[in-house]
């Protein structure tokens, strides 16, 4: 055996592997947007045409409710309400002529979670708005509010909701009265935890026979394998146990369910759609809104799931849309973690195609 030849072959093999790894890293970094973070963080409402397109009408008032819990039980993991889930709905309600109050279970400065990968200019414009800053620092106490003052209530997601929305007496009473008066009851992601244990004026469980969606078991367990131990239950299980008819899209895709005066959204990517459904349910045609690159990407992922890669690729080629390619790539990484090689390859190809669209 020629040791020298073996050494050369091993060296060449390692060199090829190294080049492949370097190429993969370079390719992955090509999905990271060029630096413009400072400009994004300084976004202002007056710079965004949609936010300046408010009709000027006064169509009513909506209450947004957020969690006051900042840690996930005994795990000690940080939590709170999801800022993007509040910000985007707030803007839709505001632009369409609805005053928005923000409440929490304890009042005051509620803990918020900023997922920097998901934060866009609407979200930073929300954070930078003086009136909003005042509202966020001084959320109203849900116990002190009268449901008769509102046309709709919107329960914002965030894992903290799994701890203080489920059995909060003020929330249960608020929802029951809203329901008896025909008000719109809406919630997104973990926000539907507020709908648990609500008894209507007729003495029935609000969820019994109601079609709903929320953050699904599959989505929850993928991100937090021990979620059931941390929360005490999974939201999907909790809702179905109380008689709800639960449905969900594939993981981390958009789904909104409207059943009478109850409107629910599956996850953070459902917020825009849910907010506009709330507006419609209140008898107002939503002001036309530019669809975001993130929404386009989620729609593209839905096409891939429902119609296949060819249809998704054709959609890119037929439309000159901007996509959030990094989001599509993240779905490829999720598929890889689930050992779904075929989906991983398709998603990687789709991410590349969307990047060059």
Image (tube, rainbow, N blue to C red):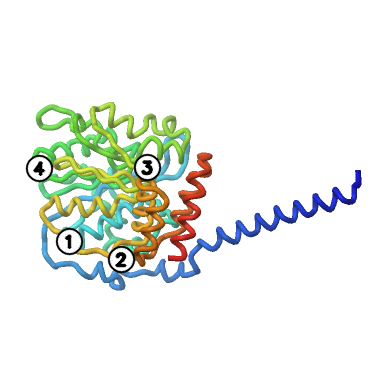
For this view, does 111 lie left or right of residue 94?
right
Q: Mark 3: which secondary structure?
A: loop
User: Which of label 3 and label 2 is nearer to you?
Assistant: 3
**Residue 81 visible in rendering:** no
Q: Distance between the residues labelled 3 and 1?
A: 30 Å
Residue 194, percent from left and from top? 26, 38
Residue 344, percent from left and from top? 50, 47
- Quadrant placement of the C terminus: bottom left
| Sequence-first disc among 3 and 4 | 4
According to the image, label 3 marks what residue? 250
Q: Are marks 1 and 2 in contact (CB under 8 Å)?
A: no
According to the image, label 2 marks what residue? 129
Residue 79, percent from left and from top? 41, 45
Q: How far apart are marks 1 and 2 (CA)?
A: 18 Å
Residue most extreme to the bottom:
47
Q: How far apart are marks 4 and 1 (CA)?
A: 20 Å
According to the image, label 1 marks what residue? 96
69 w.r.t. 277: above or below: above
User: Label 1 crowding class (10 Å Cα cut-off): few <14, some 14-19, many 20+?
Assistant: many
**Foreground of the two, 357 or 51:** 357
User: Which of label 3 and label 1 is nearer to you?
Assistant: 3
Q: How far apart are marks 3 and 2 (CA)?
A: 35 Å
According to the image, label 4 marks what residue? 182
Q: Identify the residue shown where x is 21% and y is 38%.
A: 170
């Amino acid at each position: 055996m020629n040791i020298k030849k073996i050494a050369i072959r091993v060296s060449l093999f390692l060199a090829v592997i190294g080049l492949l790894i370097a190429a993969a890293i370079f390719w992955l970094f090509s999905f990271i947007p060029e630096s413009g973070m400072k400009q994004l963080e300084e976004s202002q409402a007056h710079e965004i045409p949609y936010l300046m397109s408010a009709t000027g009408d006064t169509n009513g008032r909506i209450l947004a409710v957020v969690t006051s819990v900042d840690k996930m039980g005994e795990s000690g993991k940080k939590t709170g309400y999801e800022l993007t889930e509040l910000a985007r709905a707030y803007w839709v309600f505001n632009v369409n002529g609805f005053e928005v109050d923000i409440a929490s279970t304890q009042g005051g400065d509620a803990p918020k979670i900023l997922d920097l990968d998901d934060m866009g200019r609407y979200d930073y414009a929300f954070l930078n708005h003086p009136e909003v800053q005042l509202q966020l620092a001084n959320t109203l106490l849900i116990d002190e509010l009268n449901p008769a003052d509102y046309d709709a209530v919107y329960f914002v997601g965030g894992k903290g909701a799994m701890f203080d929305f489920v059995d909060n007496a003020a929330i249960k009473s608020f929802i029951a009265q809203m329901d008896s008066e025909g008000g719109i009851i809406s919630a997104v992601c973990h926000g539907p935890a507020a709908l648990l244990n609500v008894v209507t004026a007729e003495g029935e469980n609000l969820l019994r026979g109601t079609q709903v969606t929320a953050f699904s078991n599959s989505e929850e367990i993928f991100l937090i394998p021990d979620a059931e131990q941390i929360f005490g239950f999974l939201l999907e299980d909790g809702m179905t146990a109380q008689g709800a008819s639960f449905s969900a899209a594939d993981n981390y895709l958009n789904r909104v369910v409207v059943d009478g005066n109850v409107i629910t959204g599956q996850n953070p990517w459902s917020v825009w759609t849910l907010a506009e459904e709330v507006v419609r349910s209140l008898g107002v045609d939503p002001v036309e809104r530019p669809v975001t690159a993130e929404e386009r990407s989620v729609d593209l992922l839905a096409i891939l799931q429902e119609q296949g890669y060819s249809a998704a690729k054709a959609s890119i080629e037929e439309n000159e849309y901007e996509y959030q390619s990094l989001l599509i790539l993240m779905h490829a990484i999720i598929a890889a973690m689930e050992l779904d090689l075929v989906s991983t390859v398709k998603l990687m190809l789709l991410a590349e195609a969307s990047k060059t669209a």
